[in-house]
Amino acid sequence: MRGIMIQGTASDVGKSMICTAFCRIFSDQGLQVAPFKSQNMSNNSYVTARGEEIGRAQGVQAEAARTLATANMNPILLKPESDMKSQVVLFGKKLETMDGMDYRTHFYEKGLAAIDLALSNLARDFTHLVIEGAGSPAEVNLNDRELVNMAVASRADVPVILVADIERGGVFASIVGTLALMPERERVKGLIINKFRGDVRLFEDGIRFLESYTGIPVLGVIPHMPSHEIEQEDSLGVPAVQQVSKVENAIELVVCRHPYISNFTDIEPFLNEPDITIRWAGTVDEIGCPDILLVPGTKSTIADMRYWKEQGLENKLQALKGSTWIVGLCGGFQMFADTLSDPEGHDGIKAEIEAGFGLVPNMHVHFEKQKVVQRTSGIVKFPNTEVRVAGYEIHHGVITGTAYPLIESEDFTEGYFHDRLLGTHLHGFFRDPRCRTAFLAPIRKRKNLPEPLPETVGDPFDRWAKHVKGHLDWQKVEQIMEADR
């Protein structure tokens, strides 16, 4: 296979988004292209059509590449459960929970074998790969046993493009310093400056300096794009999922920021609603009296629920109930139960019986060893309208005892919907604009806000790919990828 690898000078410099653009551009050229990230660390995951759990970014990149996501695109997924331990997901299935030293010492050879197998499997179905690195390739304390940067570039035998984020400052030092510490620096064939604001002509001297000092061409300077509508993965992206509406009497949406938050991308669709202000609350005192309080997913439901109990969230929820719309997603929904039971610690913390917030009468959650990982669809009956929703579930907790189901299909019901209280395990529930519109309709009516006119903004992947390609020397990118082949 031919391919190209995108590495970065640090986390959250835009590697995932650049890879997403490359996947769509190559797909537009008629190439059989697939994304690949050997090892991902994220609690924002994605469920494939086969019920495999992979990093959210690779699922999104597969959509950009117009292909079905598979576990081969992200064979190793690490889901942090605490500061010291992570759940290891191998080829889409949970393997075990390991601390960092055990993982580094005992998993390395297994990891290399998984990478080689995944690359071999992808070679059967695709001609081109867009490979994403992780963090920085200049982590000198890890490079002897790393599984995600130059080791992968070498095994896949692909050139590397290094991305730097100019928005955070220090772009020259970050590029020069990273290159100085990189193993196999000769694989770096191009540089991309990302998230530029202002007149790019002001950076022309910077481009000349970088090319002269490093001997590596700058392939382009990508301007900051404030609203690309493509889901993010990195937890460093959480601060970006907020906005202040310019609409008078706007809807206020407050999101509880858990210590172990996961799948915060469930909130991103609300950024497309101009009459909503979105802010995060790390303490109960910061919540106030919003129109909507959203309790998102979590990698450790009981641990995060205990955090909020110490804050007094239980009393706050009871005070808001009936006036504020309270929404729980996945682990956040599970917190609404009367009791939660996890005697084996499958969700992170052992607990025989733990009292929940008691918002849903007679609801009980039991955490089981076998994780529910599946795609789900069904009908939601909002007042005056029905909407079909689709998404995916990833959870250990099994719920019993709920009435007033939210989602119905021919053979199952899911979630809870009654008296301004909504809960579901379905990630992606609010992604469909029809679902958001139906949910927000009574809130807009109460606040005398007009229903927004539907907008035809086109495919966000197309817009993002056009934006990136328009600011790159794309011919040079292709030359780098095809060299020595």
Image (cartoon, rainbow, N blue to C red):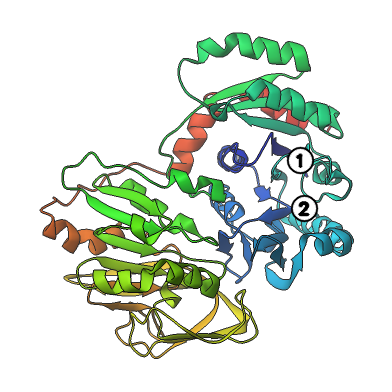
Left of 152 or right of it: where is 468?
A: left
Location of residue 381 with respect to 272 vertically, above or below: below
| Residue under the image location 55 percent in, 62 percent down | 260
- Quarter placement of the N terminus: top right
Going by the numbered disc 2, the residue's amino acid type is: Ala
Distance between the alpha carbons at the discs numbered 2 and 1? 10 Å
Location of residue 287 with respect to 173 vertically, above or below: below
Please tell me which residue lies in front, 355 or 261.
355
Q: Secondary structure at mark 2?
A: helix
- Quarter placement of the C terminus: top right
Which mark identifies residue 123?
A: 2
Left of 88 or right of it: where is 336?
A: left
| Residue under the image location 59 percent in, 65 percent down | 48
Q: Find residue 83 and report its image quarter.
A: bottom right
Q: Is residue 426 visible?
A: no
**How many labels sit on residues?**
2
Going by the numbered disc 1, the residue's amino acid type is: Arg
Which mark identifies residue 2?
A: 1
Q: Secondary structure at mark 1?
A: strand
How far across and down, in percent of the image, does residue 412 sit? Answer: 41, 85
Q: Counting other residues with Cα less than 10 Å from the Cα at mark 1, is it few (<14), some (14-19), or many (20 or more)?
A: some
Please tell me which residue lies in front, 457 or 452.
452
Which mark identifies residue 152?
A: none
How far across and down, in percent of the image, does residue 198 sit? Answer: 45, 19
Q: Counting other residues with Cα less than 10 Å from the Cα at mark 2, is it few (<14), some (14-19), or many (20 or more)?
A: some
Please tell me which residue lies in front, 48 or 260.
260
Q: Is residue 267 visible?
A: yes
Q: Find residue 173 and report its image quarter.
A: top right
Q: Find residue 360 and report its image quarter.
A: bottom left
How far across and down, in percent of the image, does residue 71 sit? Answer: 68, 62
